[in-house]
Image (spheres, rainbow, N blue to C red):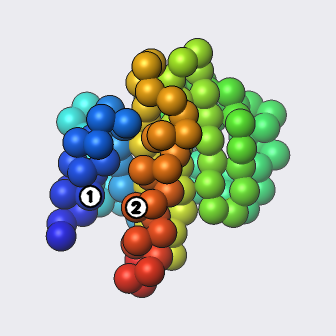
Amino acid sequence: MSWQAYVDNLVASTKVDKAAIYSRAGDSVWAQSVGFSLSTTEISEIVSGFDNSSGLQAKGLHAQGIKYFLLRADDRSIYGKKGAEGLVIVRTKQTILIGHYPEGVQPGEATKIVEQLADYLISVGY
């Protein structure tokens, strides 16, 4: 399956409205939804946040110029929320998955979809 197909499947779930897959280092975009891209600074902050969340805790989580309240940050997952929408970001062996859920979707539903894809990718070596 192509990387774009994984992004398309996340969006097709209707629990995520925008998604992207970056390399684990954050230095390249492997696939993304139309119109969903992060700045170099935003992806760098996310990459750093997996190993040391103090920067995200101090400044917040940013994506597409929007600041999200940081809910969780550890070596696997970063969650952020702004109002009724939010981000689910999961790091695998080789990728960083980013899913945005819109208003009307329960955060847990979006989290489950993105985390399940991460589990699958890890199970097949990615």
Closest to the observer, 18 or 59:
18
Residue at image coords 23%, 42%:
12
Q: Residue reaching furthest bottom?
A: 125
Q: Amino acid at mark 1?
A: Tyr
Location of residue 35 in the rendering, given as x and y in whole percent from the top left corner: 25, 31
Residue at image coords 52%, 45%:
111
* Distance between the alpha carbons at the discs numbered 1 and 2: 8 Å
Let me know if residue 90 appears in the view: yes
Q: Residue reaching furthest top?
A: 83
Q: Secondary structure at mark 2?
A: helix
Closest to the observer, 27 or 96:
96
Q: Which residue is mark 2?
A: 117
Let me know if residue 42 appears in the view: no
User: Would residue 49 appear left or right of 20 to someone viewing this image?
Assistant: right
Location of residue 68 in the rendering, given as x and y in whole percent from the top left corner: 61, 27
Which image quarter: residue 69? top right
Q: Secondary structure at mark 1?
A: helix
Q: Are marks 1 and 2 in contact (CB under 8 Å)?
A: yes
Q: Amino acid at mark 2?
A: Leu
| Mark found first going from the N terminus, 1 or 2 | 1
